[in-house]
Image (spheres, rainbow, N blue to C red):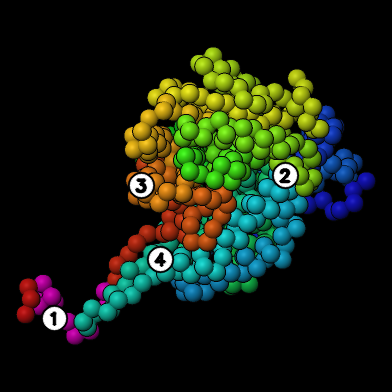
């Protein structure tokens, strides 16, 4: 029998809990590893009969109501009705929402982590995801956002204001691999003065509904926000997005997903007169120069395997100076061996299950056929790390690819793989000036553009990268590739990562627009035009 009460969330619309069209159930990620057939059977039984005794099974952690067309539209109408009143609230009051959200996350950090662990996030990575939000809403970051939202100048008898105004109604479509941390970015849109609608992914809705309904909702009530400023619904993605695109009340759609689908969605948004805000795939690169701290660079590179590579901002390829290539590859292989599978609540686990691994093996075989060398990994594995043809985990896998020009012909280099599959590219020996030029060109020619990293000690090499690398929303030098910092963006990028409007993504700025204001006293309009 259950030890804890079942989390149960109706739709959250206009400040009220609203019935949906049935329920979707969440079973714990541990149960899917222990007994997948029982877990799936419980979900199916409960979705047929919510009153079934299966609701008391300890594997079942929660349920969320499903939104139909009527509820999706009702949420949009509630957001549109609330938007003008919330936009009139002074910026300083809205900024307090960010501070209070951070305080609440700290108070409820264990709940947050537990929710993510139940959805198969290894506990150490769940804490890392929490660290992202603590930096996004840090005192330093909040002050920087505020400075960008409103600036004033004196110009003779005029008071000039450059400010950002909210776009209106912002709809959020978070991804399945990290729904709650992504949905938390909606708080920044709220701080900008928008009302929001969040779609909790139907297949993994619980953490998102918990965060919106139990954490953000009460904070908005505390701030005196009009009902409808926040709405959270669990719905089918295609159904929900189609209704958002067709609804004239929606101003912005924050879309997180794959690149090809996202770019097509961008076109439809623009055609419908809506602002698309895209967070798509990443194909991040790490460059390791000849004077790099090799052990620390290897630590950063091994982040590629965290969460089994199913995190958009982990490294996806490495370029290494040929003079240290052998040493680096040996170090990376040793670090890869330390990244192990297991139950997500175990402290030393960093691999996640990979349910659909056929493409992993297809990509791997294609790379080997093209001449890549398998350094380590390449097999399925069981919970305890034993290689197995039926395991639901994948071994951290390292490939060596010789030749910079040839490397662009490898799919594992050109595209995001979303697997624990890392190619290390070793260019032909060349003089350092030419090699540095080739590295910069290679990074800048990446079709994607989320994050890039450099490991080097030579100030001239560092300066060259800082000045000339234009690809991506973030560049890290001699640092963790996936670590978060105040002021700097947590998300965003160029190319296939962010679409034609892609850049570092500060959601508070992305969901608002710049407006200039002049307030004059005693000015002659004729003199203002023609001069005195």
Q: CA distance from mark 3 to mark 1?
A: 51 Å
Query: Which label's residue is closer to the chain start, 4 or 3?
Result: 4
Please state which of the two labelled residues, at mark 3 or mark 1, is closer to the viewer: 3
340 or 2, nearer to the observer: 340
- Left or right, 330 with reference to 30: left
* Disc 2/disc 4 C-alpha distance (Å): 36 Å
Dots 3 and 1: beta carbons under 8 Å? no
Cβ atoms under marks 2 and 3 closer than 8 Å = no
Closer to the N terminus: mark 2 or mark 3?
2
Measured Cα–Cα span from mark 2 to mark 3: 37 Å
Q: Which residues are magenta?
A: 518-529
Comes first in the chain, label 3 or label 1: 3
Q: Which residue is mark 1?
A: 524
**Residue shown at 37%/59% (left/top)?**
513
Looking at the image, is mark 2 or mark 4 earlier in the sequence?
A: 2
Residue at figure coordinates x 54%, y 25% from the top left: 400
């Amino acid at each position: 029998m259950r030890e804890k009460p079942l989390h149960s969330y109706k739709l959250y619309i206009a400040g009220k809990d609203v019935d949906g069209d049935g329920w979707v159930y969440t079973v714990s990620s541990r149960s899917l590893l222990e007994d997948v057939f029982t877990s799936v059977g419980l979900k199916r039984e409960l979705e047929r009969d919510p009153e079934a005794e299966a609701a008391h099974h300890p594997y079942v952690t929660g349920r969320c109501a499903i939104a139909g067309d009527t509820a999706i539209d009702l949420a949009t109408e509630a957001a549109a009705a609330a938007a003008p009143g919330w936009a009139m609230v002074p910026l300083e009051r809205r900024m307090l929402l960010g501070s209070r959200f951070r305080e609440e996350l700290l108070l409820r950090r264990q709940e947050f982590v537990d929710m993510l662990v139940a959805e198969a996030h290894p506990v150490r990575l769940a804490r890392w995801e929490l660290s992202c939000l603590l930096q996004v809403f840090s005192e330093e970051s909040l002050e920087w956002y505020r400075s960008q939202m409103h600036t004033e100048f004196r110009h003779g008898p005029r008071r000039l204001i450059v400010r950002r105004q909210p776009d209106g109604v912002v709809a959020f479509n978070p991804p399945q691999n990290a729904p709650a941390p992504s949905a938390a970015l909606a708080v920044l849109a709220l701080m900008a003065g928008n009302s929001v609608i969040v779609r909790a992914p139907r297949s993994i809705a619980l953490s998102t509904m918990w965060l919106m309904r139990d954490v953000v909702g009460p904070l908005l009530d505390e701030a005196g926000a009009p009902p409808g400023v926040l709405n959270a619904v669990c719905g089918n993605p295609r159904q929900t997005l189609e209704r958002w695109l067709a609804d004239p009340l929606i101003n912005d759609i924050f879309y997180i997903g794959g690149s090809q689908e996202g770019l097509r969605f961008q076109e439809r948004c623009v055609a419908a007169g809506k602002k698309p805000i895209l967070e798509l795939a990443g194909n991040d690169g790490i460059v390791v120069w000849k004077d790099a701290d090799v052990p620390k660079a290897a630590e950063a590179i091994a982040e590629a395997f965290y969460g089994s590579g199913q995190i958009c901002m982990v490294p996806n390829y490495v370029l290494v100076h040929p003079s240290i290539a052998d040493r680096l590859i040996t170090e990376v292989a040793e670090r890869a061996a330390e990244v192990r599978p297991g139950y997500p609540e175990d402290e030393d686990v960093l691999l996640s299950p990979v349910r659909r691994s056929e493409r992993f093996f297809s990509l791997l075989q294609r790379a080997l056929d093209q001449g890549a060398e398998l350094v380590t990994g390449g097999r399925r594995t069981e919970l305890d790390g034993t290689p197995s043809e039926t395991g639901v985990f994948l071994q951290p896998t390292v490939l060596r690819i010789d030749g910079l020009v040839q490397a662009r012909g490898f799919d594992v280099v050109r595209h995001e793989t979303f697997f624990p599959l890392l190619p290390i590219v070793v260019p032909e020996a060349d003089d350092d000036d030419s090699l540095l030029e080739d590295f910069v060109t290679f990074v800048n020619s990446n079709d994607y553009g989320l994050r890039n990293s450099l490991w080097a000690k030579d100030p001239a090499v560092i300066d060259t990268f800082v000045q000339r690398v234009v690809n991506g929303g973030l560049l890290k030098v001699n640092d963790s590739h996936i670590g978060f910092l105040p002021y700097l963006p947590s998300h965003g990028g160029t190319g296939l990562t962010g679409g034609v409007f892609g850049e570092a993504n500060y959601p508070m700025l992305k969901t608002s627009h710049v407006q200039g204001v002049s307030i004059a006293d005693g000015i002659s309009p004729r003199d203002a035009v023609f001069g005195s």
